[in-house]
Image (cartoon, grey):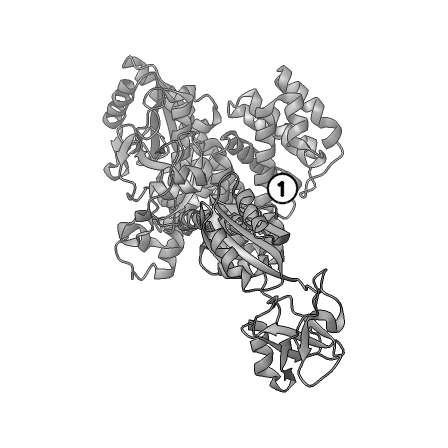
Amino acid sequence: MSLVTDDILVRARAFAEPFLSGELLDTGENLLAHADEVVAILDTMNSGNDVKAASYLVYTCPHLNRPHEVIAKTFGEAFASLAVETTKLVEVQRLSRTATSAAQLQDDPRAQTENVRKMLLAFSKDLRVIMLRLASRLQTLRYFASSKQAVPVSLAKESLQVFAPLANRLGIWEIKWELEDLSFRFLEPETYKQIAKLLDEKRTERELNMQHLREQVQAELAAQNIKASVQGRPKHIYSIVKKMRGKSLDFSQVFDIRAMRVIVPSVADCYEALSWVHSRFAPIASEFDDYIAKPKPNGYQSLHTVVRDVQDRPIEIQIRTQSMHDHAEHGVAAHWAYKEAGAKGYVGVSANSDYDAKIAVLRQLLAWEREMSSEAAGPGAATDKNNATSAAQSPDDATLFDDRIYVLTPNAAIVELPKGATPIDFAYTVHTNLGHRCRGAKADGVMIPLNTPLQNGQTVEISTVKEGGPSRDWMNTELGFLVSHRARSKVRAWFNAQITHENIAKGREAVEKILQREGKTSIKLEDLASDLGFKSSEALFETVGKDEFSLRNIEIFLRPPEPVMQPDDFVLLKKSRVVPPKSQSGVLVVGVDSLLTQLSKCCRPAPPDAISGFVTRGKGVSIHRDDCRNFQSLLARHGERVIEVRWGVQKPGQTLLYPVEVSVEATDRQGLLRDISEVFAKEKMNVVGVQTQSVKGTAWMTFTVEVSDASLLKRVMQSVKSVSGVGQVRRN
C-alpha cells in the first residue's frame, strides 16, 4: 500500500505505531495493518488527509489514559474530538451487538432503529466519523473474506442493514456495493455462490460482446460530436438477488447483467447521448428513469435506460456527467469541504458554504432514519399513514417508529425530540436556561408560533430575552406549548422554585421580626433552625413562609414560659438579698411554727398581695400569689397540699424588702431609660435589675425593684406612665 506522504499523516502513523503494531482486533487482524488499509480505502474515496490521519489516532485512544488531552496537545483539538467521538461510537456499536443474540439484535426493528439513532447523534458532532466508520467496516469484511474466517452474524447483518444503507443514503456507491456483496456472501453463502457461478459461466462471452459494443458506441457518439467515455459497469451480486426477489424474476430476466456507463461533459450532452442511444437501439419504455431532472433523495443524478441490441439482448446504459459520476462513486460526505456540491446542493438544499453542505448531509441522515423506521414498521406504514389499524402496522408499531423526530440547531447539531415537539421543547432540550428565556422561534428561517409542532430535519433557531422565565400558559395542555416530559418538569421546577423563593423571603422577614422584638438578634439563624429541628435556616424560613410552622413556637423557644412546677421537683427560688432566711421571710403558716417558707420567683409576691402556700417535699412551703398561673395549676392537681398562709407582722425597726418586676412598653427615644430610672429614684425605690430591647422604634423594658409594700407600686407605675413616650406599664 502506498501512503500519502503528507506531514500530518506521517506524524499520525508514527504516533500510533508503538501502540498498534503488536495489538490485535477482536477479529484477529493486526491493528496497525487494519489502520493502514482503512487509510487506503479513504484514499480511494478522495478523503482528506485529516480524516486519514484520524484513522490512526482512533485506535490509540484505548491505550491512552487521557486520550483527548494527549491527542489535542500533539495534533490539535479537532483531531482529538474526531478520534474520541469515533471511539465512543465504536464502543456503543460493539455493546449493541453483544447485548443480545445476533438474530434478536438485527431482526428486531427496535434494536436496529436504536442503533441508527445512536449513530446519528455521533455523526452530528463530526461528519468525518461517517467516513471512518464506513471504511473501517469495509476493511473488517475484507479481512474476513481474505482470511476465510466465520463472520459473526450480528456483524454481517449490521453491515448489510445499517452501514450499506448509510453509504447508499450518502451516495457512496463504491462502498455500498462492496459492503452489500461481502455481507450477503457471509449471510447466504450458497445463494451467493449460485449467482456468482451463473455470472461466471457466460462471463467470457459477455465481456467480448460488451467490449465490442463499448467501442462501437464511443466511436458513433464521437461521430455525433459528443465526446464521451464509455465504460463497462460491474454487476453486483446482491443487487441481482434483490432484483430477482423483489420482482420475482428468473436470472435470465434480469436486464442489467450487461451494463455500461456513458460519461459526457455536460447535462445537454447527456440528453443528446440518450437520444442517439434510443435511435440506435430499441428501448424498453418501462425501464427508463431520469434522475437528472428528478434526483434521488441522496442527490444521485443520472439517466438510466434499458435497450435491446441486434440480438435482442437487454443492455442497461447509464448516462451522466463527470461530476455526477464522482458524486455517485464517492458521495458528498467523502469530502469534508464539500466543494463538489456546487451551488445547487443536495435535494434542492443550497450548499454554497461548508455549513450549508453539512446541514444538507445531516438532513440526508435524518431522512434515512425515518425511511428505516417506516420500512421496519411494515409496508402499510409507507402507504397508509393515516390508517392506524392497518394490517401491516399495528398500533404498537406506529408508536414505536413514529415517536421521535430529529431537528438541527443553528450550529448543525442533531437534537432528538418526541414527535409533536414544539420550539419550547427544543429549547429546553438544548439548555434549561434557553428554555426559560425563550420568546420566539424560527424554523428554516421562518418565524413560527411557539406551539407549532416541529418537523423532522428542520433547522430551529430560538429568540430569547436576557432575563425572564416561562409563562404559566406553557403548562396548559390545551394550548399545546409543551410535549416532552423533560420540558414540562423543568417549567414546573422553575415555578416551584419561584414559590419556594417567595416563601423563604416571607419566612425570613417574619423570623427576623420576632428576633428583634425579643431582643435576640445576636442568635445565629442556622443555630436557631437547628435547635428548632430544621436542617437549615432556609428550611425554617420556607416552612414559616408556608404557614406550616407557627411563629408562637419560636416565641416560646426564645422566651419559654415558667415551667409548671411539680410537687416533687419544685424549684425553690432565691430569696431577695435583704430577706432573712427561713421564718424571717415575713410569711406565717397558719397553725404551724417555724416552717421554712420561700417566695416563688414566678409571681414574686409582696405584701399586701393575697397569697397561698404549697407544701413541697423536703423544701418547705412555696409562697405564691393567689392569681399566679403556676399556683392555679398546682391547686387544680394537688389541692390537698395547698395551705393557708399570711403576711406576718414586722418587728419594730425591721424592714423587709421584696423584689417585684415592672414591664414598660414605650416609643424608643434618646434618654428614655434615664427618665424612667429617675422616677424610681424619686420614689426611693431600689432598682436591682433592668432588661431592655428595642425593635423598629418600640422599646420593651423590665425593671426589678425592691419594695416593702406592693401597694406603693400603683403610684410609681402612674408616674412612670406619665413619662414622655411610655405607652403601657404593668406588674409582671
Where the C terminus falls, by quadrant?
bottom right
Q: Is residue 261 visible?
A: yes
Q: Please say if 599 is above or below 11.
A: below
Q: In this view, does 691 lie to the left or right of 656?
A: left
Residue 109: quarter of image: bottom left
At horizontal 26% and vertical 57% (from top left) the residue drawn is 387
Q: Give the residue displayed 60% in from the left and 61% down from the top.
A: 660
Instruction: Name the quadrant of the N terminus.
Output: top right
User: Along the line of sight, which residue is nearer the eye, 603 or 159?
Assistant: 603
**In front of the other: 298 or 78:** 78
Quadrant of residue 86 in the image?
A: top right
Locate residue 585, reporting x and y percent. Answer: 70, 70
Q: Between residue 126 and residue 443, name the one nearer to us.
A: 443
What is the secondary structure assignment of the residue under circle 1? helix
Q: Position of residue 22 (x, y in %)?
A: 76, 34
Front in this rendered view, residue 154 or 343: 343
Residue 510 appears left or right of 66: left
Query: Looking at the picture, how far across and down is residue 404, in whole percent?
Result: 39, 48
| Residue 323 higher or lower than 422, as above or below | above
For the image, the number of numbered tags is 1
Residue under pointer 1: 144
Mark 1 nearby-residue class (10 Å; few <14, some 14–19, many ≥20): some
Q: Is residue 302 above or below residue 433?
A: above
Q: Where is residue 711 in the image (x, y as percent from the top left)?
A: 54, 64
Q: Which amino acid does label 1 sit on?
A: Phe
Displayed quadrant of residue 210: top left
User: Is any part of residue 250 visible from this angle?
Assistant: no
